[in-house]
Image (tube, coloured by chain):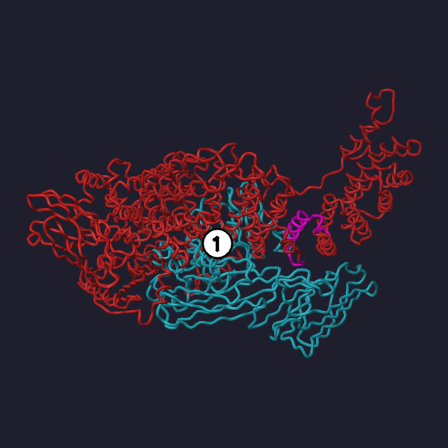
Chain colours: A cyan, B red
Amino acid sequence: MIHSLFLINTAGDLFLEKHWKSVISRSVCDYFFEAREKAVEPDNVPPVIPTPHHYLITIYREKIFFVSVIQTEVPPLFVIEFLHRVAETFQDYFGECSETTIKDNVVIVYELLEEMLDNGFPLATESNILKELIRPPTILRSMVNTITGSSNVGETLPTGQLSSIPWRRAGVKYTNNEAYFDVVEEIDAILDKSGTTVFAEIQGVIDACVKLSGMPDLTLSFMNPRLLDDVSFHPCVRYKRWESERVISFIPPDGNFQLMSYHISAQNLVAIPIYVKQNISFFETGSSGRLDITVGPKQTMGKTVECLVVTIHMPKVVLSANLNATQGTYNYDPVTKILLWDIGKLNPQKLPNLKGSLSLQSGAPKPEENPSLNIDLKIQQLAISGLKVNRLDMYGEKYKPFKGVKYVTKAGKFQVRT
Amino acid sequence: MSASSAFIDEKGGSASEPEYGHDPASGGIFSSDYKRHDDLKEMLDSNKDSLKLEAMKRIVAMIARGKNASDLFPAVVKNVACKNIEVKKLVYVYLVRYAEEQQDLALLSISTFQRGLKDPNQLIRASALRVLSSIRVTIIVPIMMLAIKEAASDMSPYVRKTAAHAIPKLHSLDPDQKDQLIEVIEKLLADKTTLVAGSVVMAFEEVCPDRIDLIHKNYRKLCNLLIDVEEWGQVVIINMLTRYARTQFLNPNINESLLEENSEKAFYASDDEEEEDKKDEVAPLAKRKPYVMDPDHRLLLRNTKPLLQSRNAAVVMAVAQLYFHLAPKAEVGIIAKALVRLMRSHSEVQYVVLQNVATMSIKRRGMFEPYLKSFYIRSTDPTQIKILKLEVLTNLANETNISTILREFQTYIKSMDKDFVAASIQAIGRCATNIGEVRDTCLNGLVQLLSNRDELVVAESVVVIKKLLQMQPEQHSDIIKHMAKLIDNIQVPMARASILWLIGEYCEHVPKIAPDVLRNMAKTFTNEEDIVKLQIINLAAKLYLTNSKQTKLLTQYVLNLAKYDQNYDIRDRARFIRQLIVPTDKSGALSKYAKKLFLALKPAPVLESTFKDRDHFQLGSLSHLLNAKAGGYQELPDWPESAPDPSVRNVEIPDWSKCTSRKDRKEKKAEKPFYSDSDGESGPTESADSESDSGSGSESASASDESGSGSESGEETESEEEEEDEEEEKKKKRKKHLDKTKAKKPVEESTESEQSSGSEERKRGRKAVKNQKSASESESESESSESGDESEDESEEESESDTDIRKKKTPVSKQPPKQSKKESKKETQEMSLLDLDDFEPAPASAPVTPVNFMSSSLVSDLEGLSLTDTILAPTTITPSGSIKMYELLHRITGEGLAVEYCFSRQPFSPDPNMVAVQIQFTNNTNSETKNLHIEEPRLQCGMRIREFAEIDVLSAGESVTVVMGIDFCDSTQAANFQLCTHTRKFFASIQPPVGELMTPVFLTENDFKKEQGKLMGMNEISEKLTLGEKCVNEHVIVERVTATANLSRVPCGSDKECRFAGKTVSSGCLVLVTVSTKEGGRAQLTVNCEKMLIGTMLVKDIMQALSQ
């Protein structure tokens, strides 16, 4: 299936290659470079590039292109999903998935890639299994290894590989048993000029950090499970239980993982936490424009809106911005044409306002369209959908774990058209 | 490239191993590479593992950077046998990379791998095979072949999985081995572990995707295992099964295509269940020839459905395409939600999903209509995503939503992304052609765009307007005039060409303007682009034909210019047109028809989606995405005209007997009540009927008491099978019976729920309490029907040896476990022949069996997937005769009549609240004993007894076994009664050990915990104990516990714990036993039971058993 993998950074340097079958010359990447050039933005590189003898399937993540080489028919999503899994594994192992960390840990990266695919077909992708096969690097371990000469490679077959719960390793022990769940909701919305909602929906995930000894069997139940319209689960979740009882029953993997993601049905009215009053205009003459933006709270359920950031992709003709922010700081990057206004906490008494003039390239016609505003925000201790975890029960182990649930609401793809 | 690699070198040097300082291999000093390699060679030759490791790490870093390290081959290959596992692994990495280039040297390593293949550690066996098969050296093909064959029957499923992976490797190395490899594939396809399934199907797809016949026998198994296969395997299996189903089943939409469009649309709005109902209602009305879905087809759809909730986008896509290609129209709708969910994922995933949604939305528009807004475009989306979303929006447009969509499109037109704007304009054009109502609105909107400042927008609008105008030019001459004026301003060639064509085509509508335009164009002719030039010639020709008075000279002029153009196309065109329109003496017959040729009525263009008809490619495939056949793409076959024989999927080998029967039953249930009018009843159904009839017949032939236990034994036999899912299979069956009893329910639904619940349960080890209850209820409620079905399984199994015997000898069949060899079966068979008149074979052997089953099923639990046949053989675990015989009447006191009893551990079928006691009478006298029966039972309050049927005659030297039932009321009080013969009465008393007062219950781990949670506090008794010397491993513990008490093992994730579950026979209280072992032979025993007395006694007994 997957023949080879090339890692390429944004500068176009090929810094790692791995072949699972016969070696394929790296010149095959020329087709990729060609497409990359055409696309201008790295986001716009087509994920699938056909070449005379191969197909290149590419993902772009963390400023790295993962270019895989395919020779025969294979579901493209299969490859894409796998490549993302590779990137996630790197992130899991090294804290971040960047060119530097990959280069720093090239041997572990290679060992991982070797385990993850056999002859191009995925072999072990479950993080718990991989961690038993190849231990993640820590400072302590690398010191010990240098002194004792012991290795990072496990000698026995990971128990998960054979058990019916491959995601969990056996013999987990903690002195402090704890299970934390973060309910993170993102509001995807498009507001039009007048502030009416064109489209809004809530997407949520429950991230878990479970550090429990032994083989705990957890059950998570909600106060209002009916809210959840569409769900997808980590393989550990028993789907049947969900179907029949609307509880999430699972034996968790060890460590951090995403338990589920969900979608709040579009029928439910989505509470939009803020409103934006904006007025951006470009004048026909004088090559200048005006900008006036005010942000205010709308439906915040009594919580404070934090980390409020407004990002505007300005038209190319905007040279500079001379603005005045009543709160927070603004920054206009004339190269990328991005105006970034970092407001911070939203104070309902004194609404933040950004006002001033824009100077345009002289002689150029005024831009056709006003740029749209992308909003970023965060509300702690609130799930905007109203979803509430009812309780978490543990079976199968005797000890009493420490349990915690946290709610956060964020703006997802939150866009205001102007 | 050289620049970039230099860059890497720089970075790599400092990056790779900082603690070792300067990395010589990557130091960027090319000149000293050889010397540096000497250094590495030295390190590899040293005795210290740490040095070797260090060297190997550097070498691997070189490989990763794509640098050539092949000259180190001899030094590296020496270390293939290194003890240090990390060094070894890195050597493997090196070897796989360079073996192809250095074939001779690579051979040096082969013997190490061959040794590795025999290693007791499965990880080493597997990795040896992995590397051996990855070395692409043709000479070792025979060795590889042998290794694969051997590994395919390895006891470790992990090794078998590796073998499956090795198959495509060998195939690509030497395609001549195909036939042999197919044999191995066939063998591995029959493997029952989830670990192997995905890999072997992958091998199948690469080596012999056309051998669909290999799948038949494994089809149902694959369907049932699917949910537990790892995600990557699921994708491959689902894609393969889609193809399979297309060849084997009938088109479920065959009748619906006869229906009107409108009525079809109505389905989409409703949700799943309703849909199903509706479909079921409508279907019979609509069809002329009734379509009956093959139960196997249904099985596939049902078992894949839960996977729509997978976190893996590839799995969701695979299921979506399966539903799109295979499901009845009414059911396809469920995939929309999942696909829309995927659009939240990474942009690459979005890209692929949108491509597929675009194709689907053409065929099944209604499906995505509710999600219209999810396809709205954000300014931050990458262009390719925007264009695909636009495509979907356009496909979804209809009369009702067009106004919303057009409003959206209006905002898109203002976007800064010009490619996207152009696509939006085209989309508007397509909406306008498809939906007549909005054509004028769209046209007006587009005309407004003509005054847009951006030329690209204008040009695109012109092109689209041109297409729209072609539909009804008469009404829009003012637009044509407007466009004629635009020609002075628009520079985009395509737009100019379009305008010229329009004017030429409809010059009659703009008789005054047209010649003027031509005049202007003639002026600039030489500077125009080629397409514009061609259109100028066209315009000239058309005007010449309609209005030659005004344009004759102009036309001549233009043609002359064209005659000397640089482009040969234009020169050709000019020549051709001149001949055609300008009458000369030589001009042929055609010139008469010139007007007809040029000004013929042209059909309006159809603006079609580029995704139309893309669905002849399997959705989700690379070929579909590229809209071109990729190498190795397997064509999705068309539905067959008539269904191929469905019986090919029946599995008749004994191991799978229950599989067949399940299917039969399903057919019986699913089809009969529902489609009873249909004449499409298939063969298997009938055979199932007859089979089960004969089964129950045999039961009734035997003594009534026995039928229950007999049937149960059939069940037990199953539980022995290696697969864990047997248990669940049983539950399923029971449930089915339950369903049968309340047959009025819509069958489709009920089977669906139980099927999927069953497969869930299997491995995840869970089950809703409700289900469990229904299972146990049904056990009692439908005992009789159950027995019929069980015996059917068993009869199939036995038919191999001797069908006649089966009638009397049902209990015997439980004895030979499936895995044991045929001989053992024969042995018992012979035994049963001897005892033909008896109920049971000699008790010495017969009562053993329940324990056997128990323990062997336990073994399978213990060993999990790594089980092999040899281990399974029950004899290795259970010493025979572990069921204890108790004396009821000694030979001497009984005056020659000896009576013994044992607790057979079979459910007592006439009354499920009773404990079955098997009593054996032996007449040691020389005369007959007559009229053996029970009298005057003296029982504690509440206790009941059900006597065995009177034995008329027991001749001298003979013995006979009967079963009686006693309800002990969950106490260990003795049941007293008198045993009477025709001459005498003996006082007898049966006192049960506490362990016999219970009957096994099959719980999943989860339920176990749940139940345990309910039975805390007073109901929990916990004791520490020290295990006896012989209790060295789980097997022994399990065996001891089950020997002491009639409990069943509960699957458990931990190997330190054994769990057992049962319920008291009389009151049905759960009894849960947990033995958790600790270091040093110590263990903790916990019993949870509502009946504290029973709990306490049980703890005592088990403690004693374990500490012996």
Answer yes or no: is residue B1026 visible. Answer: yes
Whether residue B215 sits left or right of residue B370 in the image: it is: left
Whether residue A265 sits left or right of residue B411 in the image: it is: left
- Type of amino acid at the residue the image marks with label 1: Arg
Looking at the picture, does residue A124 appear above or below residue B142? below
Camera-nearest residue between B59 and B605: B605
Local packing at callout 1 (Cα closer than 10 Å; few below 14, some 14-19, many 20+) is: many
The image quarter containing residue A153 is bottom left
Magenta stretch bounds? B378-402
Magenta-colored stretch includes residue B397 = yes
Write down the residue under mark 1. B65
Rendered location of residue B339, percent (x, y): 57, 52
Rendered location of residue B66, percent (x, y): 48, 51
- Kindly report the secondary structure that dominates the magenta region of the rendered protein: helix
Rendered location of residue A20, percent (x, y): 44, 48
Magenta-colored stretch includes residue B219 = no
| Mark 1 chain | B
Answer yes or no: is residue B35 visible. Answer: no
Residue ID at (19%, 57%): B937
Camera-nearest residue between B555 and B498: B498
Rendered location of residue A106, percent (x, y): 45, 58
The image quarter containing residue B1022 is bottom left
Q: Which quarter shows the C terminus of chain B?
A: bottom left
Residue ID at (67%, 43%): B609
Residue furthest toward the right? Answer: B549
Q: What secondary structure is found at the residue carrying circle 1?
A: loop
